[in-house]
Image (tube, helix red, strand yellow):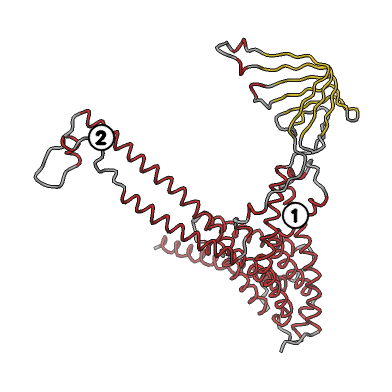
Amino acid sequence: MFKIKKIDIYVFKHFISLFVVTFLICIFILLMQFLWKHFEDLVGKGIGWSVLFEFFSYSVMSLVPMALPLAILLASLMTFGNLGETSELTAMKAAGISLFQIMRPLIFFISIICIAAFYFSNYALPMAQTKLWTLIFSLKQKSPELEIPVGEFYTGINGYNIYVREKNGKILKNLMIYDFSGGFENATVMVADSGEIQLSEDKKSLLLSLYNGESFENLKNQQIGSSPSSIPYRRETFRTKEILVDFDAEFNRFDESLLHDQHISKNISQLSHSIDSVSKIVKTMEVQQSKEIMQNPYLSWSANHPSPSIIPKKSTDEFNPDSLFLGLNKESMTRAVDIALSEVQQVKDNIEFNKVMLNEQIMYVRRHQVEWHRKFTLSFACLIFFFIGAPLGAIIRKGGFGMPVVISVVMFIIYYIIDNTGYKMAREGIWSTFEGMWLSSAVLLPIGIFLTYKAVTDSALFNPENYEKIWNSLVQKIKAFTDKFSELQIKKSHA
């Protein structure tokens, strides 16, 4: 029966404190990268704190699949590196405690983490991703906050460019407005000594009030048969001019139901149901399209073909196409070629259209299959990274944030490159989804087994003296071989 010992509590305390810190650090770094990616969607939109809190919360939840394996790798590496550096690991082994016994509480804890990661990716992650991308789409459509800068063109109002030289509170001075709402060729240019922009009460429109100015309107759409040099225009001088512009300043949320059929918003049972149903549709479409191609009588006689009466009669039922064609007159030959090209082009267009429709359904199935496998690869990656980090820390015996961070980053970059390569191969159909999504696990699992074996057998895997000895031995063997070869050459020359 499993009995908790003091040494288990001691090792677990060391690991859990480092795990929490490294997990928060990884989340922070990944969150900064994610925010930089969506920086334009957040800045200058006048978004409230509640919306920003939702965005950060859902972003953190969506980044857990990347941060969790890296945090486990770094925490396990630092834990056993610290124990090895302070000779505590040596003392434990001298007391007859094997490495597996030292790792026992952490193996149990990581197993719980793997199970929790599976349930998180199956239930919480689809909800978070659905709400996050709904929020991102809503932010992209949100109009920017109305803040007219001084000395530069403001393009936040759709169809208008506004240039202001001075501002005195809400009063804008020396304005220049380009109105492209009627098209670039029918632009209107307005200049005014001063003006004011007000938002309507329902926040759906803008009222531009201009004072003491002129407007120039291009009337190219009224040009009829005139030369480009005589394009008419209209000039207007005004004391007061008011323009009403559509400008929705409200934050309108997209309907989450628009993403309910996407792979990111489904759990395993929903993904399996979608894969099965759409796969049946794909098979039905393939059979139907094959029948259409095989049964298409594009070489049979029709009303558009030359009359068969002009075909010379033969005693046999078989005809040579070349002989049939050469037996026609010149006009019939031209008609036959044109009809054949037209029908073949029609068949080709039909095949390409069917291919597009079929590929769309196949891509839908692939994306769902990739997401289905991703639910399991996260948990397995956590387990693999622990069995890489723990034995690696016991071997190198270096703690802190120096060497462990470097090794962890290198290992995670290798994992990310392999995983991303497999994902793209599976998504494009070059590999099967199973091969593509489990490629990183298949590569890293033997590394974890090898490092665990070396750590259990107390192998000095990263001892530079051992590699120096191997190198010196290799150099000596090469030198002995070259000396022996030169002696043989000398003997042959004397002979």
Name which quarter of the figure residue 325 lies in: top left
Q: Can you say whether 304 is above or below 50 in the image?
A: above
Image coordinates of residue 247 in percent, x first then y, are: 75, 35
Q: Secondary structure at mark 1?
A: helix
Q: Can you say whether 77 is above or below 203 in the image?
A: below
Which label number is shown at residue 153? none
User: In this orientation, which residue lies closer to the viewer: 349 or 488?
Assistant: 349
- Please state, as top left, top right, bottom left or bottom right, where the C terminus lies in the image: bottom left
* In-image side of 57 versus 326 (left or right): right
Q: Can you say whether 366 is above or below 453 in the image?
A: above
User: In this orientation, which residue lies closer to the viewer: 360 or 257?
Assistant: 257
- Please state, as top left, top right, bottom left or bottom right, where the N terminus lies in the image: bottom right
Badge 1 density bin: few <14, some 14–19, many ≥20, Cα 10 Å: some
Q: Secondary structure at mark 2?
A: helix
Image coordinates of residue 444 in percent, x first then y, are: 60, 67
* In-image side of 155 versus 186 (left or right): right
Say whether residue 463 is visible.
Answer: no
Q: Looking at the picture, which amino acid does disc 2 mark? A: Ala
Badge 2 density bin: few <14, some 14–19, many ≥20, Cα 10 Å: some
Q: Residue at x 69, y 26 (%)?
A: 180
User: In this orientation, which residue lies closer to the viewer: 358 or 417?
Assistant: 358
Name which quarter of the figure residue 210 lies in: top right
* In-image side of 203 versus 114 (left or right): right
Image coordinates of residue 33 in percent, x first then y, are: 73, 51
Q: Looking at the picture, which amino acid does disc 1 mark? A: Leu
Mark toward the viewer: 1 or 2: 2
Say whether residue 164 is visible.
Answer: yes
User: In this orientation, which residue lies closer to the viewer: 85 or 315?
Assistant: 315
Q: How far apart, in angstroms, are the residues tagged by discs 1 and 2? A: 66 Å
* In-image side of 333 versus 276 (left or right): left
Residue behind mark 1: 31
Residue behind mark 2: 336
